[in-house]
Structure formats: structure tokens, C-alpha cells
Amino acid sequence: MSTEGNILLVDRRGRKYLTAVERQRFVEVARTDPIPAVQTFTLALAYTGCRISEALALRHCDVDLDNLSLRFKTLKRRQDVWREVAVPKI
């Protein structure tokens, strides 16, 4: 689907995802926020594709600085399901 030269990425439920250009702009703006916690939170969203609720549920033990990864608990399932996502060194 194209709208005035912009490509909309939509899943079968109609949710819109960021294009590569939109994602890059999001990262650029996130890096300029004066509050380090806001930078960390928004960059985690951008680099991992996690849900906001998953990012908010992160704990210190879910951050692996040695392996540059974050461990997310999937919140949409009744049983514990975890996934580890690599993040870039910034």
C-alpha cells in the first residue's frame, strides 16, 4: 500500500509498523532526549521490537551487558516464555 510515496507496513490485523526511514528517525530523536532513562527505554523499543509492556517489565537481571542482550518475558501467554534479543553497542 502506498500513500504519497510512503510505504505502510501493515500486518493482517491492520497494525502499522515503522518503515526503515521512520525507525532511523525515531532512533535519532531518541538519542537527543536529555533524560538518559528515556533514551534507554526508547532505544530498547527501537532495537528489539519489543512491546512497551515488555520493556516496562524488564528487570536488572534481564540485562546482559557481557553479551549485549536483553531477556524479555512474553506477557501474552499464561506460561513463562522468555526470549533473548541482541542489542547493538551504542
Image: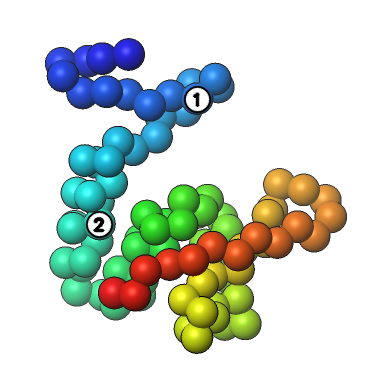
Report the front residue among 90 and 56. Answer: 90
- Which mark identifies residue 11? 1
In percent of width and height, residue 60 lies at 57, 82
Quadrant location of the N terminus in the rendered image:
top left
Report the residue that reaches farthest toward the front. Answer: 67
In which quadrant of the rendered view does residue 72 lie? bottom right
Q: Secondary structure at mark 1?
A: loop
Q: Position of residue 26 (x, y in %)?
A: 25, 51
Q: Position of residue 52 (x, y in %)?
A: 50, 54
- Identified at 19% across, 49% down, the residue is 25
Q: Earlier in the sequence, mark 2 or mark 1?
A: 1
Q: How many marks?
A: 2
Amino acid at circle 2? Val
User: Dividing the image into 4 quarters, which one contains the C terminus?
Assistant: bottom left
Residue at figure coordinates x 49%, y 66% from the top left? 86
- Report the residue at 35% width, 61% height from top: 42
Q: Which residue is mark 2?
A: 27
User: Of residues 56 and 20, which is closer to you in this image?
Assistant: 20
- For label 1, count other residues whose C-alpha is less than 10 Å away and answer few (under 14), some (14-19) or many (20+): few
Residue 38 visible: no
Which numbered marker is on residue 55? Answer: none
Q: Secondary structure at mark 2?
A: helix
Q: CA distance from mark 2 to mark 1?
A: 22 Å
Q: Residues within 10 Å of mark 2 (few under 14, many from 20)?
A: some
Q: Position of residue 59 (x, y in %)?
A: 59, 77
Q: Residue furthest right?
A: 79
Q: Amino acid at mark 1?
A: Asp
